[in-house]
Image (spheres, rainbow, N blue to C red):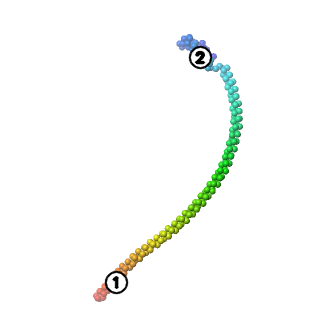
Amino acid sequence: MFNTLSYVKILEEAGFSRAQAETSVQVLVDVMDDKLSSKQDMKDLQVAVNQDMKDFQTAVRHDMKVSRVAINQDVKDFQTAVKQDMEFFQVAIKQDMKDFQAAMRQDMRDFQTVMRQEMKDFQSSMRQEMKDFQVAITHAIRDDLKSMDKKIDLLESRMTIKMGSMLAASIVIMTALQKLL
């Protein structure tokens, strides 16, 4: 409880006039009556809050039961949908795998055919190059042999001339020796 008389005295001692102090106290009392609550107000509020809490708990329990039923149904529906999707995807994946295998087999056959042809072409090309190389080597050897034959013939001619010159010189030396002896 608020003692208004003692509050008026405190304000007068602080320098307020009697009229100012009473007006100030009256304003404060009005504010307290409007804004502050009594013990009975608090008890009434507590009863109302407790009832509201009970009502709220009941409503929440009911909503949770309804939600649980709805969620369980949603989960069942979702599971069914997922199973159907999985079955659909399994069929689709199996078909895709078959198509992929068939495409890979065809690609492998095509690749083998191309590789066989390339190997044949390579072998033919290598045989031709070997023949061309053999012909070139044969011609080079023949040309070298002809060149060597010419050089040998030239060398033989030179040797014959040198031998003839040496024979003539020996004959002259022999004749000169015979005359001297």
- From this view, report whether residue 133 is shown above or below residue 58: below
Q: Nearer the viewer, residue 24 or 9?
A: 24
- Residue linked to disc 2: 28
**Secondary element at image label 1:** helix
Between disc 2 and disc 1, whose residue precedes?
Answer: 2
Q: Could you tell me residue 125's position as x and y percent?
A: 51, 66
- From this view, report whether residue 14 is shown above or below residue 104: above
Q: Could you tell me residue 65's position as x and y percent?
A: 71, 35
The answer to whether one can see residue 114 in this image is yes
Q: Could you tell me residue 79's position as x and y percent?
A: 68, 43
Q: Could you tell me residue 36's position as x and y percent?
A: 62, 20
Mark 2 near mark 1, Cβ–Cβ under 8 Å? no
Pointer 1 local density, CA inside 10 Å: few below 14, some 14–19, many at least 20: few
The residue positioned 56% from the left and 63% from the top of the image is 117
Q: Amino acid at mark 2?
A: Leu
Dividing the picture into quadrants, the one containing residue 39 is top right
The residue positioned 54% from the left and 11% from the top of the image is 17
The residue positioned 53% from the left and 67% from the top of the image is 124
Q: Amino acid at mark 1?
A: Leu
Q: Quadrant of the N terminus?
A: top right
- Residue linked to disc 1: 167
The answer to whether one can see residue 12 in this image is no
Q: Nearer the viewer, residue 4 or 89?
A: 89
